[in-house]
Image: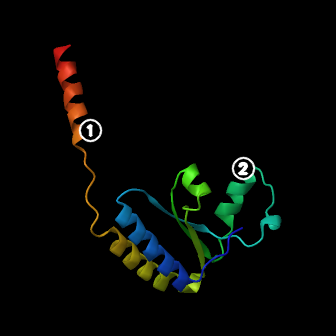
Amino acid sequence: MSKHLSQDEFFTALTALFTTQKQSQKGTILLTQKRYSYDESAKETLSEQEHEETLTTTPLPQAPILIRASNSKSKEARNEGKKVKLSTIIQPDDLDSFYARYADVCKAGMSGLKPRDRTKRKAKEKARRKMKTQA
């Protein structure tokens, strides 16, 4: 299991990831978040109905959030060590300040991106419509 970064380390690495991706002009950055569970052994195996009843009857306690970022490199690039994986855990009390900074970093990383070129797709749709009207 990989080591989780502190918030400052995470933001520094995420900024560097966006910068690297901008310079290469290609690629995808995956940003994910999920509720972090502490103890994997404490999970019980419940039937689907029991699980739904538990979710609807008991309020969920505040839990930390696991935030991940990665560049989605191919298998060959992963073998060469070019795959970047970042993760951090955010406590419920820190969520507001984290998300404010997270939004700023993401916006800064996305500025200057050029829109996708969709001319090929539009040409295909136009040709498809033309074929339908001729048939």
Give coordinates of residue 46: x percent, y percent. Answer: 78, 54
Residue at the spot x=22%, y=20% of the render?
A: 132
Q: Residues within 10 Å of mark 1 (few under 14, many from 20)?
A: few
Residue at the spot x=57%, y=86% of the render?
A: 93
Q: Residue 94 — which label?
A: none
What's the CA distance linking mark 1 and mark 2? 43 Å
109 relative position to 4: left or right: left
The residue labelled by disc 2 is 48
52 relative position to 95: left or right: right
Q: Quadrant of residue 109?
A: bottom left
Helix, strand or loop at mark 2: helix
Q: Residue 121 — which label?
A: 1
Q: Closer to the camera, 24 or 55?
A: 24
Quadrant of image for the N terminus:
bottom right
Tally of numbered tags: 2
Helix, strand or loop at mark 1: helix
Three-letter code for the amino acid on which mark 1 is drawn:
Arg
Quadrant of image for the C terminus:
top left
Give coordinates of residue 65: x percent, y percent. Answer: 59, 73
